[in-house]
């Protein structure tokens, strides 16, 4: 390093090697989970230390990187986030990439709503929000600025560090010696911060520089920011052996939704760091989202085969299309004909869905024009609620567990529907194995299906 001090990464690497050796020793007293957690913490600490040594910086993230991370977490769209920070998109992207490189983790991933935080990204974002909130509180408080916020966008760590050092050591020269920089560098930082902080920071005395309330507040601010930055490595490393990652499920209408939500509930309890996203939508829309990486898989009625060769389908269990009406509906008094059913009001899924195609074919096969429906629904629960609130009949899709949980106010219509059994399954993009979080979710879902007694 420029100041001739030895890099702490060299010392950390020795400690890392020694503790790795002891943790891998079966007689050391560490169980496997503890060994994995310990090695992860040590590795990440060494990674951060090495990066800081190579960059010559003393902070894990720069003020600019903190602003960029918070901006993208709030706006989700790169163009909007860049505009909010008065940066060009290329400069914004470079700053974000450098932050991810320094931390050694991906902070964002492509998602349905734009750039979505990863599980580890959420940890870093939380720290960045704390830091920027500290800036804003100070500017509105001790600094007495009530106009547009300037401090968060103009501050640099070297400015805050210089103020803090002068507050502690009393003179610019003593502060420079403490920080290992030149006195002109300290003086320049003090001039820079004076350009965007209205209150006077220091009063020159014969004995040195007397800090004002504003200077002491900035020094205390730097202490809090520095602590928040220094906490990041431990927070990132301290995930133990917990499952990490995203499970973003595109849910096709009227099929498999209750079991997906039950699986979500279990994985949330067992693995709270896994990010869960459920996106309802039509098949074509969800396939495009799957191609773009905005979702990870689709669950619902399989096309068998998919019209898109790059989409891989896997069967989970069967459900059946059936007509559902209120228990007091007159249609239950006898076995109705298709001609009678065509005169009823209907709730069905939108055009383009398998269940809607079945609905139209069912009536045409009986020589009847498919009836005009009073409502099209994407949501299973909304359809059931509307049946209860009306005299309509709905064509819905149920497995064994769904029928067991059918609201008491509803009842299947007594009519046989040939070809009503459909395969419910998972659609994924390509043959690449799923990540650990998705595999964990699919395992839980399979257990839920088996427990529910589905075929």
Image (cartoon, rainbow, N blue to C red):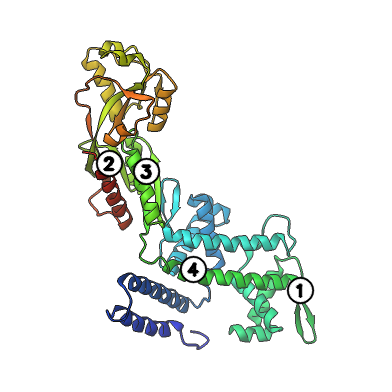
Q: CA distance from mark 3 to mark 2?
A: 14 Å
Task: Residue under label 4, please give it.
Answer: 232
At label 4, counting other C-alpha atoms closer than 10 Å, the crowd grade (few under 14, some 14-19, many 20 or more) is many
Task: Residue under label 2, please give it.
Answer: 452
Task: Residue under label 3, please give it.
Answer: 261
Q: Position of residue 284 (x, y in %)?
A: 32, 36
Determine whether 363 is above or below 62 in the image. above
Q: Position of residue 36 (x, y in %)?
A: 33, 71
At label 3, counting other C-alpha atoms closer than 10 Å, the crowd grade (few under 14, some 14-19, many 20 or more) is few
The quadrant holding residue 384 is: top left
Q: CA distance from mark 1 to mark 4?
A: 31 Å
Q: CA distance from mark 3 to mark 4?
A: 32 Å
Task: Work out whether residue 366 or residue 308 is closer to the camera in this orientation and state it.
Answer: 366
Q: Earlier in the sequence, mark 3 or mark 1?
A: 1
Task: Residue under label 1, please give it.
Answer: 212
Q: Nearer the viewer, mark 2 or mark 1?
A: 2
Secondary structure under badge 2?
A: loop
Q: Are marks 2 and 4 in contact (CB under 8 Å)?
A: no
Secondary structure under badge 4?
A: helix
């Amino acid at each position: 390093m420029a100041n001739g001090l030895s890099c702490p990464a060299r010392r950390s690497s020795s400690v890392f090697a020694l503790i790795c050796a002891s943790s891998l020793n079966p007689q050391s007293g560490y169980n496997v989970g503890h060994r994995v957690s310990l090695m992860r913490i040590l590795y990440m600490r060494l990674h951060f230390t090495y990066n800081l040594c190579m960059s010559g910086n003393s902070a894990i993230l720069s003020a600019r990187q903190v602003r960029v991370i918070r901006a993208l977490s709030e706006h989700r769209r790169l163009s909007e986030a860049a505009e909010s920070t008065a940066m060009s998109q290329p400069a914004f992207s470079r700053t974000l990439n450098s932050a991810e490189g320094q931390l050694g983790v991906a902070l964002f991933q492509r998602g349905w709503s734009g750039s979505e935080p990863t599980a580890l990204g959420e940890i870093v974002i939380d720290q960045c929000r704390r830091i920027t909130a500290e800036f804003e509180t100070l500017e509105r408080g001790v600094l007495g600025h009530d106009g547009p916020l300037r401090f968060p966008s103009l501050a640099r760590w070297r400015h805050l560090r210089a103020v803090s050092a002068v507050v502690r050591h009393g003179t610019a020269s003593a502060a420079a010696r403490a920080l290992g920089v030149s006195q002109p560098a300290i003086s320049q930082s003090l001039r820079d911060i004076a350009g965007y902080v209205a209150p006077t920071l220091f009063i020159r005395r014969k004995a040195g520089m007397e800090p004002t309330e504003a200077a002491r507040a900035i020094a205390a601010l730097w202490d809090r920011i520095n602590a928040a930055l220094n906490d990041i490595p431990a927070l990132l490393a301290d995930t133990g052996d917990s499952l990490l990652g995203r499970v973003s499920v595109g849910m096709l209408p009227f099929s498999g939704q209750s079991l997906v939500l039950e699986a979500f509930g279990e994985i949330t309890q067992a693995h709270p760091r896994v990010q869960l996203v459920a996106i309802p939508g039509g098949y074509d829309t969800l396939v495009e989202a799957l191609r773009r990486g905005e979702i990870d898989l689709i669950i619902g009625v399989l096309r068998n085969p998919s019209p898109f060769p790059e989409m891989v389908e896997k069967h989970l269990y069967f459900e059946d299309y059936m007509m559902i009406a209120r228990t007091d509906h007159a249609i239950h008094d006898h076995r109705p004909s298709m001609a009678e059913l065509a005169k009823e009001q209907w709730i069905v899924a939108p055009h383009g869905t398998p269940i809607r195609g079945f609905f139209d074919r069912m009536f045409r096969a009986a020589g009847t024009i498919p009836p005009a429906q009073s409502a099209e629904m994407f949501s299973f629960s909304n359809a059931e609620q509307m049946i209860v609130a009306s005299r309509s009949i709905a064509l819905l899709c149920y497995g064994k567990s769904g029928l067991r949980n059918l609201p008491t106010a509803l009842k299947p219509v007594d009519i046989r529907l040939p070809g009503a059994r459909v395969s419910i399954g998972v659609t994924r993009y390509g043959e690449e194995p799923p990540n650990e979080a998705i595999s964990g979710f699919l395992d839980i879902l399979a257990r839920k299906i088996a427990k529910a007694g589905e075929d």
